[in-house]
Image (spheres, coloured by chain):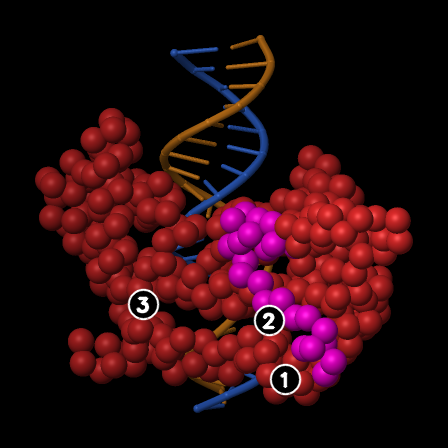
Chain colours: A red, B blue, C orange
Amino acid sequence: MAKKRDPDKSARNRIIKDLKERLKALQPDVLRTTGIRSELSLNAIIGSKNDEYLDLKNDVINSDAEFINKWLSGLKKMSQLGDDAAIRLVSLLRANNFFKNYLMLYLKRSFLIHFDELSKKRPSLDKSEIWIGQENANYGLFVTPRFKDGKWENDKSEIRAFSYGYWTIGHVLSTGLVIPNKNKKIEFKDLDQLLIFFTETLVRNSGSQYEYDIADQYAEFVKNSDNPLNIPFMIPEFRYLGIEKKHKYRLDFMITNPYTLERVGIELSPWSTHGYLSKIGDLTQKEINEMALDNFEYEMTKHKNFFKRHGIFSLIYTDSDLKDCKKLFKEDIQPLLEVEQPVTQISFSIMEEFL
DNA sequence: GCACCCCGTCTCCACTCATC
DNA sequence: GATGAGTGGAGACGGGGTGC
């Protein structure tokens, strides 16, 4: 189904069209003077090296000048290292003005075609895979999942082209949740089905009334939103060790800002499960204090480790907060879900009008 | 060393369907 | 009816791995 048109995107496409026409006009001279057989061959000689000259998976690039600069820096570096294809490109660039002009227009066009992918923050490969849930009911959430050699992995080259906001409701609806080491997925036909699975399977299994309550608030919030697909998915039971069967720690919830990729953990920490000491009738005061210290150390180490390994800061809510989960959700969690896309730094409409 | 296969990159083109 | 956004397939090149 076609989406509503974006005037800035239309302007960008008109600029791309103009660049294509200029490239077409230059092509006969480039092919004649370089001896390259065809347009396809010429484009492949330039384009197939993109991933080597720049870091397509991680670099965030906001202008064609920056893209061309990085590309040429990568080309120079590879030619100095003795790469034959790069040496060939450098010699063509230095000796042939037709080729030089073609290359500059080509790179500019390539940047504009892939502007959406290159200008957004993208998750690194190791942060494109999340495992959630309990020991025998765990699921994987990937950006571009594919099953290969008996396990799930991301299709690396497609991570940057992913069209939904990373770790949003739209993301989960599009990829589903994968079953570890089996070529099976839990897929959701619509939003209602996803939210029911979220509250009644993923969260209810945790056995925490507070988590269940917060999950209900979240589901209501998503249902009432004008644009539910763009809302960050509130990831439940985020596993510290990923797919490993024996888990070390889990976070109650984790929210990722789809634009900045900043992660925030939410830990509901009532005294009854995180501090209360049972069966202490025969223990001395010293032994009781040691037990309490162990509990405290465990909790604090968990949050330090989540930050060190996964870059997650955690907000910890105790009994006084949990007395009113509705208030907690509205005041503390909802603002993390109401994220807005930063204004695009380049206005293609302005470029088209004046340049 | 060579041939082959697979994967990852790119562009072009044909197609569908919403919007102008 | 024309145009444009989005998608998927085809075909190009380059690199790495493998087998002979």
Which chain is disc 1 placed on?
Answer: A
> Regarding mark 3 in the picture, which secondary structure is present there?
helix
Q: Which residue is mark 1?
A: A330
- Kindly report the secondary structure that dominates the magenta region of the rendered protein: helix
> Label 3 sits on what residue type?
Ile
Left or right of residue A57: residue A338: right
For the point 25% across and 78% down, the residue is A352
Question: Which residue is more in the foreground, A313 or A257?
Answer: A313
**Marked residue nearer the N-terminal end (1 or 2):** 2
Q: Which residue is mark 3?
A: A16
Report the magenta residues as a range. A299-324
Left or right of residue A187: residue A111: left
Point out residue A298 in the picture as x, y percentages from the top left corner.
67, 50
**Marked residue nearer the N-terminal end (3 or 2):** 3
Question: How many discs appear?
Answer: 3
For the point 11% across and 48% down, the residue is A97
Same chain shared by disc 1 and disc 2: yes
Tell me the CA gap for discs 1 and 2. 15 Å
Which chain is disc 3 placed on?
Answer: A
For the point 73% across and 48% down, the residue is A286
Badge nearest the viewer, 1 or 2: 1
